[in-house]
Structure formats: structure tokens, C-alpha cells
Image (cartoon, rainbow, N blue to C red):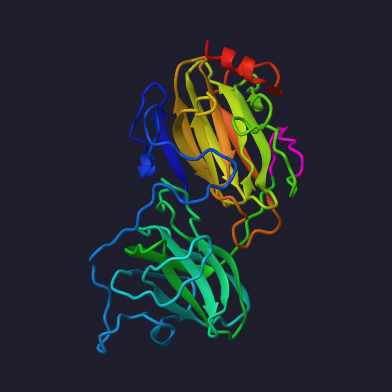
Amino acid sequence: MRRSALFFLTMTICVVGSGQEVWGQGGAHPDLGNERPSGKPGVSPQKRAVANAVALDGVPVGETMADAIVISSLPFGDAGETCDNQDDYDAACDYPSTSPDIVYAFTPAATMQLDIDLCGTAYDSKVFLMDASLNILACNEDYYPPNDPCGGYVARLRGAQVSAGQQVYIVIDGYSGGCGTYQLSVDEFVSCELTCAGDILEGEPTLTAGYNDRFNSGCNTEGTSPAITSLQGDAAGELSFCGVSGFYGTTTEYRDTDWFAITLGATGEVVWQLNAEQTTLGYVIELDCPNPGVYGLVIGGPCESGGLTIIGAPGQSIGLWIAPPVYVPPFGMIGNEYDYEFTLSGLSPHVAVSVESINWGSMKSLYR
């Protein structure tokens, strides 16, 4: 699915496509930090009184492994409601819960990896995979970030390994005690690998366990002025960029956040396209540390391009922020780094493309 939005920088809050929210001064503010917070702010359990399917014995279908809903073949899709179920099982992907859950059973004919997607679910959800002995094989919650068209804090489990002839159970669960309506899609997982052909390479050092991010880390830069990469278009006002993001840390969980500065061209309109090997967020921001204003959101990956049109004043300077929505590698990801790419058109044109790291003093001068 291609995700797109249109908004105006001159407005504090405006309506965008795909049901996404745009933040301006005084509005709700997304998390632009690199360190994982201790809790999940701004989320409360939801309860909806919509009856689930009920068998003749009075037990909701899919209540336990014994009466699990059978998935006979892939691809598979279903929809339902969890509020009339009981809390029979749990797996603490990130947070334990007391939410009601519903169970599906699948026996693959061949060894494969699964993509279990709850896109379209109406509450803060969790999904996990277990075997007949209740061993947790894989788990995910919060795959989709807040304001995603698929739903905020909705789960997706990509790359879960299952063996031929082994019956496994898919459990749809929730955060805290939340429940509600869900959409389920199950298919064979296909990994995403980008071959970036961009003109500019980011050049950030390898993300290691003890990494101290001072490379285009913006307002998250420690002990020095915010490091922001200035991007300039070519003679036609275009740019293509190849970057690396991911995760680092030892006792604390961190994500790599990349901060850029751009200048709108003569039309005052810039088109931003973002793609990545993992789900990746891109915010349009006002560069004003420590609390930059946020104008809009684009979501790219995995191997799906997200698009955003930025409309402002010719010559106006703004910021771009890119990072994963979570603080640890999602299930199925190999290693702790992944590639992303983006293109920009409509930039202020220059004879040659250049990239330079600029200090905070020169960045603030752009707004004077």
C-alpha cells in the first residue's frame, strides 16, 4: 500500500490524506528521541461491547487452543472481535497484559516463514505464535507507529519460522486490558532487500553496542551542538539519498535517529519519497531544539514507498527526521542495521550536489 499525505507548513494544524494527524505548535507531539522510554505514554485500554461468534456450547469460537479457528491455507484473512473472549494466554513481547485473546491454528505443509498482520485493527494489539506445549515461538506488539493508516500500536509479526507438519497457534491479544475489533492477514513472509542507487551515501559509522551517536543525531546529540546534515539539490532541485538506520546500546535500548535540513525551491513545493527494509518513520520538523515542532509524517518500508508533498514558502528551510518506530530490532530482522533510501524533488537548485554537517549556530541562522 502506498502511503501519501498533503499538508501546508504555514498552518498550525491541517487535515491530511490517509487519516494521518499533523502536529503543529501546541498540538500533540510524537516521540523524536533515540532512547526507549520506560512506558507507553498516551495509551489507555479500549473496551467495545460487540459480540464475538459463539459456538453452541456457549464458548466463543477461538477461545482456547482446543477450539482454535483453523487456517487451512495461505493467504488467509479474517476479522472479528475479542471483547467477549477471556484472557487465556499471554506473552510479554514488550509488556505483559490481561487482555482477552482469540486463537487460530495453522499446520504448514512445508517449512516457511510467516507474515502475520493485524493492519486495520481498532485497538492497541499484540500477536504471538506458540506451539502445542505453550512455548512462545515469536511475538510482536506496536509494529505500526501512532497515526499509521493501519492503526496506532497495531501488531505485525514478520518472519516467524514454522516447520512442515508442526501445528502452531496464532494468538491475537492486546495491551493492558484492551480489546476490540481486529483484522487478521496471514501469508508467507518475503524478506525485503533494497539496492539503493542514490547519489549521496550517508556515511554514518557502524552502529555497535557502545555507540555514541553524534552523526546527524540532531536534538539527540549528547555533549555538543546538535549534528544536522544539510542536503542540497542538484541543478534541477532533485536529490536521491542512501542511508542506514537501526539499533544500538547495551543495558539501554537506543534507536538511530537521522536529522536533515533542506530548503524549498522556487515553487515552495517539495515531494519526499521514503522507502526502507524495515518500517521507518519520516517526520517533517521545525529545527528548534530541544522540542522541535512537527508538521507531518511519512511512513516507508518494508519495500513500500511512502510519499509526502511539502508546501511552504520558496526558500523556506525545514528539517527531516528519519528513524525506526521502535527501539529494538523487530522480530525477523537479521543484525541491528538496515538500509533506507529517499528522494526529494523541488529543492532549492544548486550547480552541484553537496552534503555537509552543520553546527547549531549556523542552523539557527536559517530562521533569522
- The number of numbered badges drawn on the structure is 0
Residue nearer the viewer, 39 or 270: 39
Does residue 213 sit above or below 53 in this rendering? above
Magenta-drawn segment: 196-206
Residue nearer the viewer, 98 or 271: 98
Q: Is residue 270 left or right of residue 82?
A: right
Does residue 70 sit above or below 147 in this rendering? below
* Quarter occupied by residue 287: top right
- Residue 124: x %, y % from top left: 40, 57
Q: Residue at x 34, y 64 (%)?
A: 179
* Quarter occupied by residue 300: top right
Q: Main secondary structure of the magenta part?
A: loop
Does residue 69 sit above or below 50 in this rendering? below
Residue nearer the viewer, 34 or 107: 34
Q: Residue at x 70, y 37 (%)?
A: 213
Residue nearer the viewer, 307 or 152: 152
Q: In the rendered structure, does residue 289 fall within the stretch colored magenta?
A: no
